[in-house]
Image: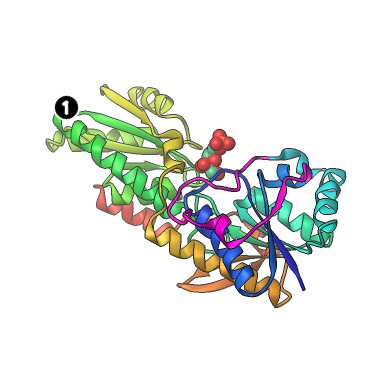
Amino acid sequence: MKKIAVLTSGGDAPGMNAAFRAVVRKSIYEGIEVYGVYQGFQGLINDNIKKLELGDVGDIIQRGGTKLYSARCPEFIEPQVRQKGIENLKKRGIDSLVVIGGDGSYRGAQRLNEEGINTIGVPGTIDNDINGTDYTIGFDTALNTIIDAVDRIRDTATSHERTFIIEVMGRDAGDLALWAGVAGGAETILIPEAPSDMKVVAERIETGMNRGKKHSIIIVAEGVMSAAECGEELRKYINVDTRESVLGHMQRGGKPTGNDRVLASRLGAYAVELLINGTSGHAVGIENNSLSKTSFDQVFEENHKIDEGLFRLSKELSI
Ligand code: F6P
C-alpha cells in the first residue's frame, strides 16, 4: 500500500486549496493514507508533516491562499538538505509526493523523483507559464481580479481623460498582462516575451489623441519594467500626464473562480491516479480540455511561450 504526501510551494495561487482537497479526498477514496507537508519544501526538511483525514480539507474549496502554507526554499537545491526531507518521508513509509506549485517547485519535485520518491507536479501558479498545460491553477482567478481593477481604473481614466499605467505580476511571464489587456481593452500591453518600444507606444497614444481619444490604458508586466519607469520612459517621447497603479499581491488572493476550482479538483485527483498506476516524474495538466501528463524533462525542455495569435489580435483590436 502506498502512502502519499502533498505540499504546496512557491507563490500561492487561488485554487491550491481545491487541489489539496482533491489529492486528500481521492487518496482516501482509494484507501490510501495521505499526509500534509506544511510550509512547502521547508516543512519537508523541518519534518512539519501530519496525517490527514477527510475533515482536514473540509470548507476549503472556496478559499484563496493555501491551508498547507507555502514557502520559497532556495536551500532545497542542496542534495544533503533534500536528503533530510526524504528521510522524513521514509520514516513514515511515505513513498509518493504531490507537489502543487510553479516551475521552481517542479525543479525540487524532479530532484526528489530522481532520488527515489515518486513525485507528481500539479501546476499551481497565477502566472500560467508552465509547459504541458494550457492553464495553471490560479490564472483564471488572478485574471479576473486584474480585469475588475482595470475596469474600475478605466472609469476614472475616462472621466479625467488620462493615461493610466497598470503594473501586473509576471516576472518572466506575460500571460496575465496579455489576457487582462485583451479582456480589459487596453491600448498597450507590454510583456517580457516581446520587445517594448516606448516610441511606438507614444505614437499610438498620440494618434489616439488626434482622433479625439483622450484616455488610454497601458498594462505592463512587472518583468518588463515598473509602472513608474514606464511613465518616465513614455514622457521621453510625449508630453502626457500619467497615473500609475501597481496591483501587487492582491492579484494572488481571493476566492478561486469556478474554473479554477474544477481545474484544481481534476488535476489533484489525476495526480493521485497516476501515482496509483505507477507513474512518477511527471506533471499533470489540461490540454485541449483533456487531462494530460508531461515528464518534468519535457516541461523544462524550453521556455513557456505566449500565444502569438492572441498578442497579434491585441494589437489589431487596440488601433
Ligand atoms: O510566481 C508567482 C508570482 O506571483 C509572480 O508573478 C511574481 O513575480 C512573484 O510570484 C512574486 O513573488 P513573491 O510573493 O515571493 O514576492
Residue 113 position in % (x across, y down): 78, 61
Where does residue 182 sit, x and y in percent of width and height? 31, 51
Residue that lies at the very extreme toward the left in this rendered image: 212
At 55% across and 64% down in the image, what residue appears?
A: 22
Q: What segment carries the magenta color?
A: 45-72
Is residue 47 in the magenta section? Answer: yes
Residue 152 visible? yes
Indicate whether residue 311 is drawn in magenta. no
Q: Which residue is mark 1?
A: 160
Q: Is the CB of mark 1 within 8 Å of ligand 1? A: no
Question: Can residue 130 be seen by looking at this rendering?
Answer: no
* Residue 225 higher or lower than 171, as above or below: above
Q: Secondary structure at mark 1?
A: helix
Q: Amino acid at mark 1?
A: His
Left or right: 209 with respect to 26? Answer: left
Q: Which residue ends up furthest to the bottom in the rendered image?
A: 277
